[in-house]
Amino acid sequence: MKLHSFFAETALFLLAAAVFILPPLAAPRAEGAAFFSTELLFRHLLHCAAALLCLSAARRLRPEFFGAAARRNCSAVTAVGSGLLAFGWLCVCAAVLQIGALFGAYSGGISDFDELLPASPAEVLLCAATFFLSAASEEAVYRAFLPDSLACMLLRLLPRRDGQAGAVQASKRRACAAISILSECAAAALFASAHRYLGAPAVVNAAAAHVFLRRCFCRTGRLAPGVLAHFCYNMGSLALLRSLS
């Protein structure tokens, strides 16, 4: 790899970490923050645009990563099916965790959702737009950018071993597999930690959701199926909360 490409990738990864990954981990608990507001919508709009630009730059630097192979071979049927499957698993996982939280008498998380929910049709539309932008930015960062970028960074740390001997190739494969697993686990852990203000069940649910949505992206190489599955799940959760409030 050329030296300027190495520095460009490193700078892009550090910038993404500073803008998208570290702030949710350092942010205080968001008790009482509504799911809708024009300020929140504008902030998510900027966040989403920056996330898509970051992913586009990463794909230019490493065209062979970030779902390139799957994107070339993905049909419309595969994209729709993967999105529906991810949405179904999101709903099943959330239902199981909610039942477990009820039986376990869990009392953490946000204490009163009623004050955070939209009441008027205009507030619902504002909330929906915010949810869509949030889903798009999270899919771009956590499902597309972070796992592959982290893997690229770690792969550079591997010692170069020339040769075609079986032992050398087997060692390379094991190292690449370990790095892939580590990158996937790190991305899931970071995404789950960003939801800690919602309570322990939400953290577990977010970790599972990352697995389903990341699998959707790996199968299709496209953001749209995961974004729509993520958005529909969030809107379904909102509708359920409004019906119970």
Image: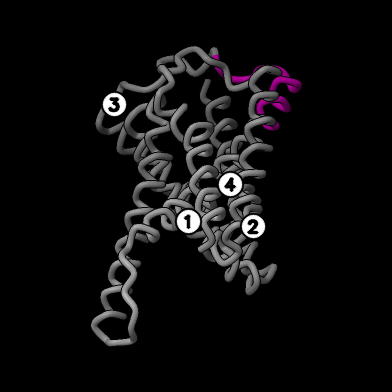
**Residue wearing tag 1:** 148
Hey, what amino acid is under mark 4? Ala
Relative to 165, is 133 above or below? Answer: above
Residue in front for this viewpoint, 151 or 14: 14
Magenta span: chief secondary structure: helix
Residue depicted at 54% across the width and 44% down the height: 12
**Residue wearing tag 2:** 60
Q: Nearer the viewer, mark 1 or mark 4?
A: 1
User: What's the CA distance linking mark 1 and mark 4?
Assistant: 11 Å
Relative to 119, is 238 above or below? Answer: below
Please provide percent x and percent y for residue 2: 54, 61
Q: Which residues are magenta?
A: 116-129
Q: Determine the secondary structure under disc 3.
A: loop
Hey, what amino acid is under mark 1? Asp
Instruction: Using a 10 Å C-alpha cutoff, classify the residue at mark 2 as few (fewer than 14 neighbours), some (14 to 19) or many (20 or more).
Output: few
**Residue wearing tag 3:** 106
